[in-house]
């Protein structure tokens, strides 16, 4: 896994841009994607700003600065917005408010409905009151606010991808997006639970796959689960030319580590911790089977086992668990989250995972 040293974020940004701009041998069919994991305080948000500044007018970006466009007003129970900002101008001009509401309600799984009044510079929220279907103003949580902000950007992004998919510029519904060349997404999952993180990662992966234009994608995150699910979303896509990186500081240098086509968080302690927390919270989902299988495969390869199932010899359920994990981990990513699991399958998962941890002393002193 190659490592490169840099003196500044500007240098890192320039290298990422060069790699995104390097044509693939089948350029018209391949989607250029760079995914970067970086812990907090390593320069990740700074990288997104520098990349945007270096490529002004060519970048559609989501980062912490987008969230700064919103502020909650406790007196009016409204989310204040700058109606003159470009993103709200696009929402108004392209009539995207209904699509935003649909995306928001899908991600929250609730009947809360945003009500846009862009001219007045605010968004309020309502729920069915039970009397004639009327709506009443309510206060939303910080997580629900984050989901709305993401829903606004993602809806604009959907519109951009669809519009630029029309190859002939003169046949597009608008020329407002013609200058966009890069999509930059920096950590859209702050203040969100794991279920929403998985949903957003799958949405981003599906949107990249649907793109039929020249757009190039740079995605940065500090969240291992978001990185992991997005990595898996693109793993089977033959038309993704994807680079996977880890960015970290080694004073006074910045280090960019190239992980090739290997996810740095599909194994070892990060995933073990993720699964352990899910077991403790009784919130095992289908995507945890996918994570566990990746963990088993990486461990088997490292220890020299020919088959990953050899790691579970003597475990409860045995061959039956192999069939179970094969079934769940090979299902399409779009249904990793939504299907509830039967109690006996969850218990089989717990038994196999505990056996694996104990046998190989993960997280313990041998």
Image (tube, grey):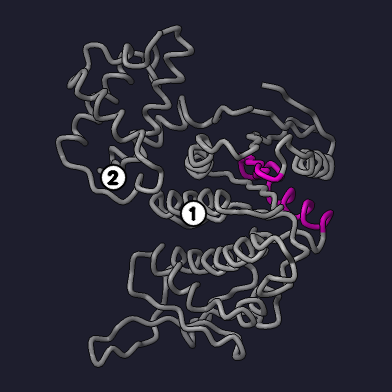
Q: Residue at x 62, y 90 (%)?
A: 119
Quarter of image, res 212: bottom right
Residue 354: x %, y % from top left: 27, 24
Task: Name the quadrant of the C terminus.
Answer: top left
Q: Is residue 53 magenta?
A: yes
Viewed as shown, does residue 86 lie left or right of 98? right
Q: What segment carries the magenta color?
A: 28-55
Secondary structure found at label 2: loop
Answer above or below: position of 124 versus 49.
below
Task: Name the quadrant of the N terminus.
Answer: top right
Circle 1 residue: 203
Q: Residue at x 67, y 55 (%)?
A: 213
Mark 1 surroundings: few (<14), some (14-19) or many (≥20) residues within 10 A: some
**Relative to the observer, which residue lies in front, 151 or 162?**
162
Q: Which mark is residue 29?
A: none
Q: Residue at x 68, y 59 (%)?
A: 61
Residue 123: x %, y % from top left: 52, 82
């Amino acid at each position: 896994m190659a490592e490169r040293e840099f003196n500044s974020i500007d240098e890192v940004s320039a290298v990422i841009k060069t790699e995104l701009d390097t044509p693939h041998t089948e350029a018209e069919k391949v989607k250029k994607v760079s995914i970067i994991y970086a812990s907090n305080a390593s320069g990740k948000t700074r990288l997104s700003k520098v990349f945007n500044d270096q490529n002004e007018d060519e970048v559609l970006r989501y980062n912490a600065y987008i969230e700064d466009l919103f502020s909650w007003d406790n007196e009016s129970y409204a989310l204040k917005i700058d109606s003159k900002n470009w993103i709200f101008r696009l929402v108004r001009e392209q009539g995207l408010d209904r699509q935003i509401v649909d995306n928001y309600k899908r991600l929250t799984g609730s009947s809360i409905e945003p009500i846009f009044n862009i001219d007045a510079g605010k968004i309020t929220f309502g729920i069915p009151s039970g009397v004639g279907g009327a709506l009443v103003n309510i206060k939303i949580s910080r997580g629900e606010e984050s989901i709305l902000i993401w829903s606004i950007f993602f809806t604009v992004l959907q519109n951009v991808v669809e519009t630029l998919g029309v190859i002939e510029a003169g046949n597009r519904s608008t020329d407002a997006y013609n200058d966009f060349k890069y999509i930059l997404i920096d950590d859209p999952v702050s203040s969100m639970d794991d279920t929403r993180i998985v949903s957003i990662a799958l949405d981003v992966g599906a949107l990249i796959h649907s793109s039929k234009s020249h757009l190039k994608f740079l995605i940065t995150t500090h969240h291992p689960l978001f990185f992991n699910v997005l990595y898996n979303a693109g793993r089977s896509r033959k038309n993704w030319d994807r680079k996977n990186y880890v960015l970290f500081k080694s004073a006074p240098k910045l280090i960019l580590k190239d992980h090739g086509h290997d996810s740095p968080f599909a194994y070892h302690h990060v995933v073990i911790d993720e699964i352990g927390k899910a077991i403790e919270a009784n919130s095992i989902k289908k995507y945890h089977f996918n994570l566990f299988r990746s963990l088993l495969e990486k461990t088997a390869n490292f220890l020299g086992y020919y088959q990953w199932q050899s790691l579970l010899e003597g475990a409860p359920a045995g061959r039956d668990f192999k069939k179970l994990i094969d079934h769940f981990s090979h299902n399409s990513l779009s249904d990793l989250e939504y299907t509830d699991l039967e109690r006996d399958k969850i218990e089989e998962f717990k038994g196999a995972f505990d056996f694996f941890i104990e046998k190989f002393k993960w997280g313990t002193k041998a």
